[in-house]
Amino acid sequence: MALTLYALEGCPWCEKVHDALQAADLEYRTEWVEGLHSTRDEVKRVSGQRAVPVLVDDEHGVTMAESANVLEYVERTLA
């Protein structure tokens, strides 16, 4: 799958990104992360930081964090 979203259960910013991806009718995989920043090694490996949400778009070679940036990317590039 070309799109992977790293998200935390109950995170309002992650939910906004989920909603945008679903509204755009995009297929994506969600990787649920742990609540503690110190245990988010996979997120750090792919994005260089431990905060979520992080969207990885393998098809376009894009990895991005910050929900506002991800939402803009979904709207302008993927939708």
Image: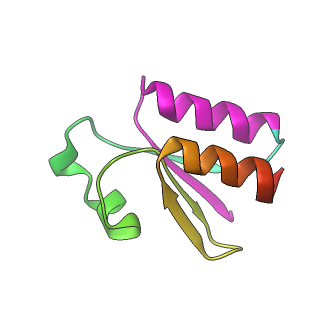
> Over which residues does the magenta segment extend?
1-23
Residue drawn 71% across the image and 73% down it: 59
Number of numbered discs overlaid on the protein picture? 0
Farthest left residue in view: 38
Q: Is residue 11 above or below residue 51?
A: above
Does the magenta-highlighted stretch encompass residue 20?
yes
* 66 or 27: nearer the viewer: 66
Residue 40 falls left or right of residue 69: left
Locate residue 75, reporting x and y percent.
Answer: 77, 47
Residue drawn 75% across the image and 36% down it: 22
Q: Is residue 12 above or below residue 52?
A: above
Residue 59 seen? yes
Locate residue 6, reporting x and y percent.
Answer: 47, 49
Residue 66 falls left or right of residue 16: left
Residue 27 seen? no
Q: Is residue 36 above or below residue 39?
A: above
Residue drawn 39% across the image and 65% down it: 47
**Display colour scheme:** rainbow
Locate residue 20, reporting x and y percent.
Answer: 71, 36
Residue drawn 59% across the image and 49% down it: 70
Locate residue 16, reporting x and y percent.
Answer: 60, 30
The quarter of the image holding the N terminus is bottom right
Residue 9 falls left or right of residue 41: right
Does the magenta-highlighted stretch encompass residue 19?
yes
* 22 or 65: nearer the viewer: 65
